[in-house]
Amino acid sequence: MRRLSWPLAVLAGGVVAAPVGLLLSFLGLLVMYLGLFFFLLLGLMVGAFMYRVAGAGACVSKPALVCGGLAVALLTYFISLFLESRRLADHVANSFQYPTVSAGQPVTPANVEEVRARMASQKQQVRDRVWQMLAGRCPPGGFLGYVRWAATDGKLELEVPFAERPIKYRLSQSPLGFKLRFSLCLVLLCAGVLAQVWPLRRAGVSVAEVRAESAASTRPSAIPPTSAS
């Protein structure tokens, strides 16, 4: 069971990576790079959880600690950035004032469902145009297209049939700021996880040494025979 303690800790860290990545996807775009603090803090929490799972195990080698810790940190960051990219279309769609509302049409109980359906259809058109734009300007689109777009431009302009003027949107961080945030968040997350699991190697060795010394001290020593006087 001791040999499986570290693989179980890595597996547990991978499970925790999903909710942590979801939370970090909302915190990454905070103003003034305040999200960096949470990447370090939650990285420490994930590493502490892994330490608790594997703390009673045997000695873990340095390569295994580094590989396992980095794997969990990278998985957490990938989930965070992926979920952040999936919300881009919603941000763009919600930032536009739709004609069904701005035109001043009265909303009555008789047509409220029709208005809601029309707005939902128009929002979906905007979302579709966002992904089409990413696929055209930053192939292959999707998650990788979002990363390329945010790191090189961060601005978009969409033309939709129901809008008189193009929809303009700008990411809250400049391309340089996105690159800086991308690098620092990854470094802080990896540092937080590894800082918590790193003592496992030393702790495992000390426990093994203590057990060896304890076994040696409790072993009965041979008593030399006494010579007859």
Image (cartoon, rainbow, N blue to C red):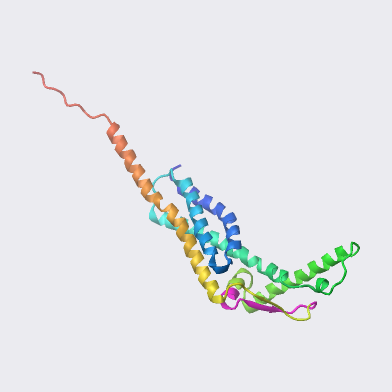
Judge whether residue 71 is colored magenta: no
Q: Position of residue 177 (x, y in %)?
A: 54, 73
- Residue 188 in view, yes or no: yes
Q: Position of residue 28 (x, y in %)?
A: 57, 65
Which residue is situated farthest in the left direction here?
Answer: 229
- What residue is at 62 percent from the left and 65 percent from the top? 84
Judge whether residue 160 is colored magenta: yes
Which residue is situated farthest in the bottom direction here?
Answer: 165
Which image quarter: residue 220? top left
- What residue is at 62 percent from the left and 63 percent from the top? 83
Q: Which residues are magenta?
A: 148-162
Position above or below: 91 against 160: above
Q: Which quadrant is the C terminus positioned in?
A: top left
Position above or below: 164 against 70: below
- What residue is at 61 percent from the left and 62 percent from the top? 26
Position above or below: 192 against 53: below
Which residue is situated farthest in the top direction here?
Answer: 229
Position above or below: 54 against 102: above
User: Horizontal placement of 129 versus 14: left or right?
Assistant: right
- What residue is at 46 percent from the left and 46 percent from the top? 54
Which image quarter: residue 115? bottom right
Q: Position of residue 186 (x, y in %)?
A: 50, 64
